[in-house]
Amino acid sequence: MLIAVSMRVTENNTYVEQRDSLSHDWAQLFNAISVTPILIPNLIEDPTKYLKDLPISGLILTGGESVIENDTSTPITAYKKRDDTELNLLSYASENKIPVLGTCRGLQLINRFFNGKNSSRINQTHSHKVACNHDITILTNSIIPDMSKQIISVNSYHEDGVLIEEISSELRAFATWNNETVEGIYHPELPILAIQWHPERNPEITSLDEKIINHWVELCN
């Protein structure tokens, strides 16, 4: 199964050269779920045409960097060209009902696309910690109904996030942290879902991630 995958923008520390990249962790996850990735460059002139010409079954929006909230917002780690590329990809996927899976930044970008709001530096304004594991609550939902109301530990690497009151009116939450931030979202009418944690960074795929990803893969088939 061919899946389009977005990439983060990185810079070489010893000389000026921006490049698109994807963590090796993703390759291990792709192997585990039998997915063949097609990586999407961030400077492609027409992302929509690029995607249209590919025989893909789905789209993954990966993590890394902040999402620019508006034209005047310029977080140091935000790269507008990536925002523009991914928003175009998401627009095409939505119009054509191509299944989308977002992770970390991908969740925030999806929320922004559907006119929700994201909050920066929640590790400073809330008790949220970075680079650790924390417990999330799985809400009653149709994505992983057999895990509803469970408390499950997931990794956390995000400084930005979506507060519960900031989620788009078009999206639904299926997981939250501390009754403050959104950890999992889905669209009730489109094949779009996203999680705030990084499934690719776990040594082995967890039961929670396996159920979520299997649900998404079924949408792709």
Image (cartoon, rainbow, N blue to C red):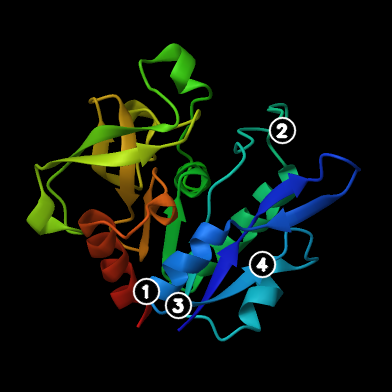
Mark 4 / mark 3, whichever is N-terminal:
3
Where residue 39 appears, x then y in whole percent? 64, 69
Mark 3 / mark 2, whichever is N-terminal:
3
Q: Nearer the viewer, residue 59 or 198?
A: 198
Mark 4 / mark 1, whichever is N-terminal:
1
Q: Identity of the amino acid at label 1?
A: Ile
* Residue 150, quarter of the rendered image: top left
Q: Secondary structure under badge 4?
A: strand
Q: Which residue is mark 3?
A: 35
Mark 4 packing: few (<14 Cα in 10 Å), some, or many (20+)? many
Query: Decide: marks 4, 3 in contact (CB < 8 A)?
Result: no
Q: Identity of the amino acid at label 4?
A: Ile
Q: Give me the C-alpha separation between circle 2 and circle 4.
A: 24 Å
Q: Which residue is mark 1?
A: 33
In this view, 27 is above or below 61 = below
Mark 1 / mark 2, whichever is N-terminal:
1
Q: Give me the C-alpha separation between circle 3 and circle 2.
A: 35 Å
In this view, 195 is above or below 162 = below
Q: Secondary structure under badge 2?
A: loop
Query: Decide: marks 4, 1 in contact (CB < 8 A)?
Result: no
Q: Nearer the viewer, residue 69 or 206?
A: 206
Q: For the N terminus, which image quadrant?
A: bottom left
State the mark number for residue 71.
Answer: 2
Q: Identity of the amino acid at label 2?
A: Asp
Q: Identity of the amino acid at label 3?
A: Val
Where residue 134 appears, x then y in whole percent? 28, 32
Q: Which residue is mark 4?
A: 40
